[in-house]
Image: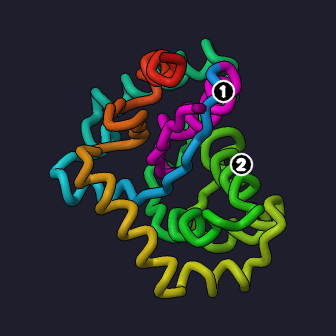
Amino acid sequence: MARTVEFFFDVGSPASYVAYRRLPAIAARTGATIDYQPFLLGGVFKATGNHSPAEIPAKGAWTSVDLARHAERHGVPFARNPFFPINTLHLMRGAAGLQDDPRFIAYLDAVFDAMWREPRNLGDPAEMPAVLARAGIDADAFTALIAADATKARLKATTEAAVARGAFGAPTFFVGDAMYFGQDRLDWVEEALAA
């Protein structure tokens, strides 16, 4: 039976972006499935007392360089976003609301690329229509989707469930009950999926 990797992510996390780009090849090599689980990193930080590396100048600078190294090693196009960090609540509500929609991966592709490949200020609402159009999503329909109570509840529930299982940052992966944190642990994720 094929194994599944649960991938908890926030599009505002550059490490989540690198993992997002690497995971499909890992799944193909291992015959695994990816269970994409959008959560709100700010909510995870609040619940766990964790903080973004960007809040610590030396760690933020090192993390930026380290992520660029990992991206280059794995052939992932990566550009530092000069608008980082931004509030991703609207973006992650969009991911939660589109999770069962056929455009879900197109949405993630468009948003991750706009954050970390061709950096745009996705905290500016004026930037969103062009990004959404790349995924075939109408901007007005998106606004309604992210305002829906069911969308808000889904994102909150996924965030709380991840924290309850031990998540404290992004990306977080689960293979069965085993948790792995960080895009730099994907080798271990692959080993677990291949076992």
Q: Residue at x 61, y 48 (%)?
A: 115
Q: Mark 2 = which residue? A: 109
Q: Residues within 10 Å of mark 2 (few under 14, many from 20)?
A: some
* Residue 15 rendering spot, x and y as whole percentages: 48, 35
Q: Is residue 178 left or right of residue 129?
A: left
Circle 2 SS class: helix
The disc at residue 31 is: 1
23 part of magenta stretch: yes
Q: Is residue 129 left or right of residue 123?
A: right
* Element under disc 1: loop
Q: Amino acid at mark 1?
A: Gly
Nearer the viewer's eye, disc 2 or disc 1? Answer: 1
Q: Residue at x 38, y 28 (%)?
A: 61
Q: Point out the stretch of residues depicted in magenta.
A: 1-29
Please report the residue visible at 47 percent of the width from the left and 43 percent of the height from the top: 6
Q: Residue furthest left?
A: 49
Residue 125, position as x, y percentages in the image: 62, 73
Q: Quadrant of the N terminus?
A: top right
Q: Which mark is residue 191?
A: none
Q: Position of residue 138 (x, y in %)?
A: 79, 77
- Mark 2 or mark 1: which comes first in sequence? 1
| Cβ–Cβ under 8 Å for marks 2 and 1 | no
Q: Is residue 127 above or below residue 84?
A: below
- Amino acid of disc 2: Asp
Front-lying residue, 69 or 166:
166
